[in-house]
Structures are given as C-alpha cells and as structure tokens.
Amino acid sequence: MQTQHIGIIDMGSNSIRFVIYQVDSSACYREIQNLKVAARLSTFIDEKQNMSNEGIKVILNTLKRFELVAKDYEFTALRGVATAAVRNASNRDEILAEIKKHSRFPIEILDESAEAYYGYLAVTNATSFNEGVTIDIGGGSTEITYFENRELLYSHSFPFGAVTLKQTFVAGDTPTKEEMKKIREYIRDALYSLPWLKNKEVPLIGIGGTARNTALVHQARINYPLSGLHQYQMNLTAITKVRDYLSTLSIKKREKVDGLSKDRADIIIPAMSVFEECLTYMNSHNFHISYRGLRDGLFYEHLLGNIDVTHFPNVVEESFYQFTHNYQLNREHQHRIGVLSAFLLNELFQHHSNSKSTVSENDMNLLKRGASVFYIGRKVDPESASQHSFYLLANQSIDGFTHKERLATAFLASFKSKSQLKIFANNLSDFLSKDELKKYELLGSILRFAYGLNISGRNIVSRLEVSHLTKTALYLTAYHDGDAYFEAFEAGKYKKHLEKALKKTIHLDFIDESRESDEFRPAKSF
C-alpha cells in the first residue's frame, strides 16, 4: 500500500476545520494538517431558521481557502460533513447546492445520531475506557452517548450548544446570576429527559473545543507540568473553579487568558455549565478530555473499514505500534529487552517475597511498555538518550494511557541512574509518592540492565536465572548462545544501578550454551 492522504472537513456551528491524515504502507497514521476558521455559522441563522447569504458566503470562502491547501495533495478519500447549523437550516438544500456549484469538496449533512456515533467511535478507539459517557458541546447542538464494553448503547442530541446558549440566554458578554440560573434550569430539564443517564457514576468524557479550552485554562491555572490534553482528568470542583474565575473577568481580559481561544471567550461560560450539570445528574466525579473527536471518528471508520472492523482490539497496543514505527525502533531488539526484564522480575518474584507484594501485574505491563520504547531518545541524540527519552514520552499523548501512566513509562524508558530519576521527578511531586519513585527505580534499573544484555542487538542472551538470593547478595546467571562479550561488558557496568535498587551485591555469571570454541567466550563473571 502506498502512502495515502485522507481529508476530513468538519463544518460545525462554531468553527469549520479541514484535517488531513497521512497513512503509510504499514498502516501507521498521523495528522499532518489541521486548519480552522471560526465561522460562527449559528449566528447567521434568522428567525425563520434560514442561513443568510452572508453565512453561505462565509462557507464558500472558507472552502476556497481549504482548496488552496488541498491542491498539494492527492487524496485517497475526501469527506466533508456539516452538523447542526446547516442541518437545522430551513434552506439547507440551497446551501448544499451552492457548495456543490462553487466547491470541489463533497459536503453531506450528518444527522444527530451519526454525529453522536462518530464522537463515541473516536473515544473508544483512542482511550482505554470500557464504559463511559461522551459529551460533545458544539456550537448549535450537544451530543451525549453512553457505552459499555466499548459498545454504544444510548445516544441523544440536544438542540443547544455553546453559541446558541449564549444567544438564547445571555444579553451581554458575561452571564448574570439570573441568566446563569435560567441556563442551569434549562440544561437540567433537558438532562432529566434521559433516564438512562441518571446516577450512571461512570467517567464523563468531553469532546470538542469547549472541553479542550476548559482543560487548557485549568492546566494554565495550576501550572500543570505535562504537555497534552488527551485523557487529562478534572473533577466537578475544578470545572466550577475555572468557570467562576472566567466569570470575574471582562470579555477583553477573558480573551487574553492562557489556554482560552479568543473566539470562545464569549461563549464558554454557559457551555461549561453543561459539564457541571451533567456530572451532577450522573452522580459522577470524573471528567476526562478526549482530544480525539468527530473528525477522528470519521477517519477511524475509513481506516478500520478496510479490515472490516470498527475498533482497534487494544488501544494501548496500537498506540505503541504507531509510536515505535514513527521513531523507527528495532522492535525485535526492544522486545528482547522486555523478555529479559520479565525473566529477571519473575525470578525476583520467586526468590524474594517482598517483590511479590510491591510489583503487581500492572507493573509487569508497565515494564513491558517501558521496554518497547526504552531509550527512544537515541533517535534524537545518542549522547543524551535518557533526557530525550523522558521528554518525548512525558510530553506526547499516548492513546489509551492516562497522564500518570504516560509519566511512569517515561521514567522507566529513560532510566539512567537514581540521580537522573530524581532530576526528572523534581517538579512532579504532585504526581508521585516515595513508594512509586522507588518502584520506578527498580523497574528502570532492570530495564537498563536488560538493555546492556542485548547491547549488540543480536539477541545473544536467551534467559536469566537467579540461582541464589541472600540479604546482601544476588547470584544471577545469564545464558547465551554465541559470543556475548559486549553484553557481558555492558551488563557489568549497568548492574550497579540494580544493586542500589535492591540493596544487594550482584554476582553475574555467563554460561554459553552454544558449541563455539572457548576463545570466543566472554569472561565467566562480572
């Protein structure tokens, strides 16, 4: 399969976006263009629900701008969808006719159920939630879905959004107390029509610009140390604090708030109330952000439709496949690091009861993830592999991983020494306990030791065994097939970090199980 380009146009009530995805021959994909025009199409709807000529002109001019970019690509697929503003317009046939006459882009009306479905599809292919509620507050509508075991069970579209709430209830730039009371009552009454949503007590997952901007402002307010919005978590109190803060500011000051898009400064306060009321009605305390939304759902349908499925079997596995491919890692080498690390950890389980109580199945999975991207920073600069590994993993979204899981992976995959680990953890005390840091030191030192045991990338060392363990010493045997001189040398250097983590002296022996002559065998012990 040659490199493909898939174009998606999302014509919403607040903004119109053009996103281009690139898919290579290994089915690895990435977003290469994401262009936005704050069109505010909902504001061009008159009392008879017709979109004005001015609004249609905005659409056509926006599409012309997109065409200037699109002409540089050959598209395998190109799909444009219009949501509430066009969908609900009385003259929507006229709008579509004008688009067809003046633009090369195919634009279709997306009905309410389809709009909700694609949001759900994005969330369940980009997070690890098996059960949850998605909410996408657009400019003119709000879509809510409930899924269980990654299957869509209920969906609903409300005829209000960020723009229309502002138009309907707010006279000035900032809602008054009385206006906010009316907004809340209106939203509450709407939610009461969904009995399947009441007291769900599952995560509420926000999609779209209102959710992203809410989280961005919150991150800026608390000086959040990590990059990325995807799977960022807030609670009801945090949302309320952000809304209260924005409510104290004039529109001019609000437009300058870090994290808040200027084009949302006048509409975000009423819209945030939808999140608050929804969490309250659900009796839920967990609000998560999904950076993937409607456009990504449309893309996933195209990508996965080629193999006749709707979902990735495992979101995290898919993410790490994409990750290792994008950085051109030697997957066989990374896998060997994981195998040797697991051998050692299992041996410690069997010989040291304390290890069983401190290392869980989740930690074993974490070790596997860390191995798959261990020292990924070498692709940037071998001399600073640890620093680059930590930065890349701590500051890049990984679908299916929470921010804490992402950070844990960064600590393990970048492990160089205990002192370097402490430097990385210096400004992250809110994320870490002392016990977690000790765990990362142990798992990280195991990974670095295993990295040394496959330093030449030839998979010479096949397995590890702990022959004896005392309070002060660990006797470890590495079985190999062929000349393991370099592996023995590097492992001999790196074992000091594992010794510090275990507080034991490591006696490392190598046994060659091949038939090569003795002159090519490394020293027996280090």
Image: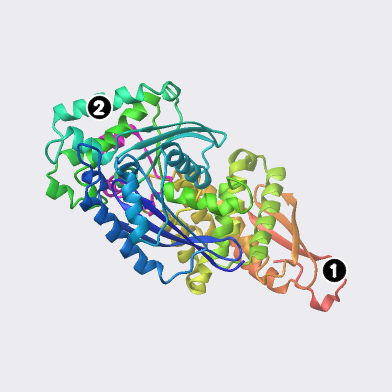
Q: Is residue 51 above or below residue 326?
A: above
Q: Is residue 382 above or below residue 110?
A: below
Residue plotted at (69% across, 69% down): 487
* Distance CA(mark 1)–CA(mark 2): 75 Å
Residue tagged by mark 1? 514
Farthest residue to the right: give it.
515
Camera-side residue: 11 or 326? Answer: 11
Label disc, if present, on residue 388 of the rendered structure: none
Answer whether residue 81 is magenta in the image. no
Location of the C terminus (image quadrant) = bottom right
Q: Secondary structure at mark 2?
A: helix
Q: Residues within 10 Å of mark 2 (few under 14, many from 20)?
A: some
Q: Is residue 213 left or right of residue 205?
A: left
Residue extent of the magenta highlight:
215-244
Residue plotted at (34% across, 56% down): 99
Residue tagged by mark 2? 184
The amino acid pointed to by label 1 is Ser
